[in-house]
Image (spheres, helix red, strand yellow):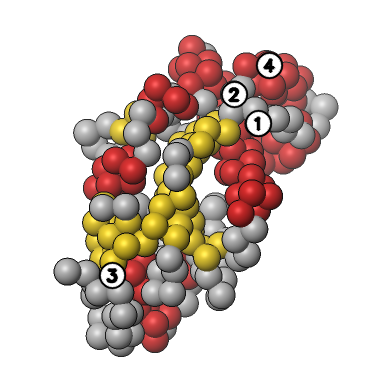
Amino acid sequence: MRQVVIDEIPFNPDVDAVADRLHVKPGSGRMAALRRMVARAKEIARPKALYRVVRVEAKGDDYVIVEGAKLTSRVLRVNLAEAHRAFVYIATCGVELEDWTRSLEGPFDQFQADAIAGMALMSARQALAQHLEQVFRPGQLGEMNPGSLPDWPLREQRQLFALLEGSEATIGVQLLNSYLMTPTKSTSGLLFPTEHEYYNCQLCPMENCPGRKAGYDPDLYDLKYRPGLVPPSREQAP
């Protein structure tokens, strides 16, 4: 399937929610400045997402082959054991907010703008999820992102970007030699149908993570993902 760009994404952050996240007190001078900053962000923000439906073509013990690209991860291989298709995506706050953040001089203003850009990225991810639900009705989706777990390192970004051609021209996202992305408030990953709820957080022991969606389960890897535990599917790699 051809890749699809989603770029008509509304961004209307609630000022009070932003203030609460940044610990800005209502009625303070910082609150007035934050209101002006949020208003400006609404004017210029253009969050975007790019995705493609991909076929899961083959599976080995610790990798899957998706549209000719080899993705090496034992956890991903097990999560895709019964999957025949998945959604590869990139989502971003947009170069507009990135450029605006960099133009600000004060460190506190930059900190606030960075948080607002993070919320724009969340809007892009939500728009992508809504679009996939409306178009494909995939049911419950799990998600994995290169670099979120040691099992699927950040260098695997290059494989995902190879599946989505022209990301810089279409949505302004560039993969750097470090395998990080610019704009910095961007993310990439693979969404896949799953019968059981899955979050990377379940396998990540990092404490006090502000983005945590589920608790860490120290036994989950050995119970489900340990090499040799789950036999390869009938779709063997050559």
Q: Where is residue 3 in the image (x, y as percent from the top left)?
A: 45, 38
User: First in sequence: mark 3 or mark 1?
Assistant: 1
Residue 213 occupies quadrant: bottom right
Q: Position of residue 219 (x, y in %)?
A: 41, 83
User: First in sequence: mark 3 or mark 4?
Assistant: 4
Find numbered disc 4 in the image and state the secondary structure of the residue it sits on.
Answer: helix
Q: Mark 3 points at which residue?
A: 59
- Identify which amino acid the numbered label 2 is placed on: Arg
- Please tell me whether residue 195 is drawn above or below residue 84 in the rendered image: below
Q: Do the residues labelled 1 and 2 touch (CB within 8 Å)?
A: yes
| Residue at 54% across, 52% down | 210
Find numbered disc 1 in the image and state the secondary structure of the residue it sits on.
Answer: loop
Q: How far apart are marks 1 and 2 (CA)?
A: 7 Å
Q: Residues within 10 Å of mark 3 (few under 14, many from 20)?
A: many
Q: Distance between the residues labelled 3 and 1?
A: 35 Å
Q: Distance between the residues labelled 1 and 4?
A: 13 Å
Q: Do the residues labelled 3 and 1 touch (CB within 8 Å)?
A: no
| Residue at 22% across, 33% down | 177
Q: Name the residue under label 1.
A: 9
Q: Distance between the residues labelled 2 and 3?
A: 38 Å
Q: Are marks 2 and 3 in contact (CB under 8 Å)?
A: no
Q: Position of residue 185 (x, y in %)?
A: 48, 34
Q: Distance between the residues labelled 3 and 4?
A: 46 Å
Q: Mark 4 points at which residue?
A: 43
Give the label on residue 46, or none. Answer: 2
Q: Residues within 10 Å of mark 2 (few under 14, many from 20)?
A: many
